[in-house]
Amino acid sequence: MADAAASVREGADGRLEVHGELSFASVPALWRSCRERCAAGSALDIDLSHVRRADSAGLALLVEWLREAQRSGTHLRFFNIPPQMLEMARVSGLEGILPLHGD
């Protein structure tokens, strides 16, 4: 079984950095750990450049973070989405819904 370790850390630039693999095994813990930050109000930037691999659960996590942010009025942006996740977002029609940024 693959390592389910994934974490979120505060980056030097103030963005939250997601590290590891976003899978059905790791996503529930990440959701719980970031839910309050997504609902904190104001703005939140999440950097995905350290994501090694993601399945559909990873994409679902981004959607849930976005929903939580919208409910609370938090301006959420995702940066450096890995190509694999970007392709899943395109195929599923989420590319235009998720606030994706290059850098």
Image (spheres, grey):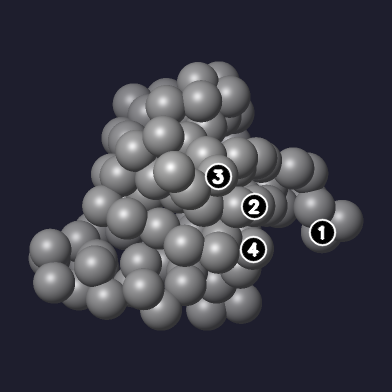
Q: Position of residue 22 (x, y in %)?
A: 45, 49
Callout 3 amino acid: Asp
Q: CA distance from mark 4 to mark 3?
A: 15 Å
Q: Which residue is mark 2?
A: 19
Identify the mark at residue 50; answer none if there is no mark.
Answer: 4
Badge 2: residue crowd in 10 Å (few <14, some 14–19, many ≥20):
some
Q: Do residues under tags 1 and 4 come within 8 Å of each other at their CB atoms?
A: no
- Element class at badge 3: loop
- The answer to whether any part of residue 65 appears in the image is no
Mark with earlier residue (1, 2)? 1
Q: Position of residue 3 (x, y in %)?
A: 55, 44
Instruction: Give above or below for 50 relative to 18.
Output: below
Instruction: Give above or below for 73 relative to 10.
Output: above
Left or right for 17, reference 52? right
Callout 1 amino acid: Asp
Comparing labels 4 and 3, the label whose residue is closer to the camera:
3
Q: Do residues under tags 2 and 4 come within 8 Å of each other at their CB atoms?
A: yes
Q: Which residue is mark 1?
A: 13
Comparing labels 1 and 4, the label whose residue is closer to the camera:
4
Q: CA distance from mark 1 to mark 4?
A: 15 Å
The quarter of the rendered structure image containing the N terminus is top left
Callout 2 amino acid: His
Left or right for 57, reference 29? left
Comparing labels 1 and 2, the label whose residue is closer to the camera:
2
Mark with earlier residue (4, 3)? 3
Q: Residue at x 58, y 24 (%)?
A: 33
Q: CA distance from mark 1 to mark 2?
A: 16 Å
Q: Residue at x 20, y 73 (%)?
A: 90
Badge 1: residue crowd in 10 Å (few <14, some 14–19, many ≥20):
few
